[in-house]
């Protein structure tokens, strides 16, 4: 397997909202500190909104500010998660009653269309607690530049971008990055989100068509954290 090193680290403080690149990350059992730590809750449906159901989310951007989160909306206005007026701004922007919620012990309910071409045949499931992650088998995601081909990495929202190739071969293995140890549990199935438009990117159904046809529906791998620690840009990945 080609040597793998950390090229970029990304944190997405609000689920399905644009995130921030960071040079160093603290990794706990819930993943990178602050990653998917907040979600936009739809009061009517009882689900945590994602760009599957609300594509406009990808045109906003979020960053951590201490123990709070700041979100910048497409019109340039900003609000903070602990500001009472923030929910009103978000509801006005999205055209529905929503509430920005910090993750807790109870996981969120999510939805996905089985027919990604037409956004039809929706199914729902319950995610794990602690952070707004989709799967109990993935708290941190990794993808190599080789696997990304010429696709923009923002479509896939992976936490760690690796120089090199061969991350699929890590499934079932323990790996170390920095002083954090991860148990790589699965390849990550891709959904309609990778086709959605966002700043500088057009809607592109061919992305998911290609992944389904050539990569068995998967791109990147998901891991659980077995030893907490820190990871940095430039760290080498070691298989244990």
Image (tube, helix red, strand yellow):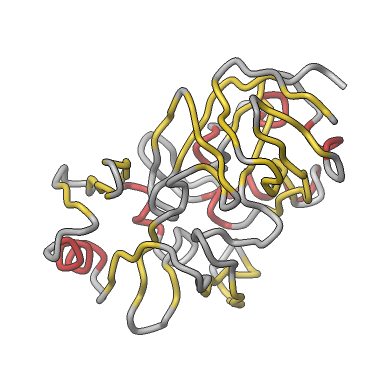
Quarter occupied by the C terminus: top right
Residue 91 horizontal/vertical position (percent):
21, 69
Q: Is residue 152 left or right of residue 21?
A: right
Q: Residue at x 34, y 84 (%)?
A: 44
Mark count? 0
Q: Position of residue 162 (x, y in %)?
A: 65, 25
Q: Residue at x 30, y 64 (%)?
A: 100
Report the front residue among 52 and 187.
Answer: 187
> Where, quadrant-wise, is the N terminus in this rendering?
top right
> 175 above or below 145?
below
Tell me: residue 143, above or below residue 83: above
* 127 horizontally vs 144: left or right: left
Task: Give the quarter of the image for residue 89.
Answer: bottom left
Image position, residue 117 (x, y; %):
59, 61
Q: In x, y percent, where is residue 71?
A: 25, 48
Residue at 44% in and 41% down: 202
Asked whether residue 210 is in view, the answer is no
Residue 187 seen anywhere in this rendered image of the structure: yes
Q: Residue at x 86, y 35 (%)?
A: 169
Q: Is residue 54 above or below residue 31?
A: below
């Amino acid at each position: 397997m080609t040597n793998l090193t950390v090229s970029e680290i990304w944190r997405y403080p609000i689920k399905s909202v644009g995130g921030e690149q960071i040079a160093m990350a603290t990794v706990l059992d819930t993943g990178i500190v602050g990653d998917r730590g907040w979600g936009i809750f739809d009061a009517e449906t009882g689900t945590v909104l994602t760009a599957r159901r609300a594509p406009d989310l990808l045109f906003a951007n979020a960053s951590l500010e201490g123990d709070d989160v700041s979100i910048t909306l497409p019109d340039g206005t900003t609000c903070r998660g602990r500001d009472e007026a923030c929910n009103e701004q978000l509801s006005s922007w999205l055209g529905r009653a929503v509430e920005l919620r910090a993750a807790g012990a109870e996981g969120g309910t999510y939805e996905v269309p089985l027919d990604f071409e037409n956004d039809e045949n929706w199914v729902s499931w319950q995610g794990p607690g602690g952070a707004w992650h989709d799967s109990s088998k993935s708290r941190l995601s990794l993808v190599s530049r080789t696997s990304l081909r010429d696709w923009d990495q923002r479509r896939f929202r992976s936490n760690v971008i690796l120089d090199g190739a061969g991350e699929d071969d890590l499934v079932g293995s323990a790996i170390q990055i920095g002083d954090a140890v991860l148990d790589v549990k699965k390849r990550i199935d891709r959904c309609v989100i990778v086709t959605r438009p966002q700043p500088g990117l057009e809607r592109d159904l061919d992305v998911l068509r290609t992944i389904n046809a050539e990569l068995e529906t998967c791109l990147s791998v998901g891991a659980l954290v077995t030893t907490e620690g820190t990871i940095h840009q430039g760290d080498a990945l070691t298989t244990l």
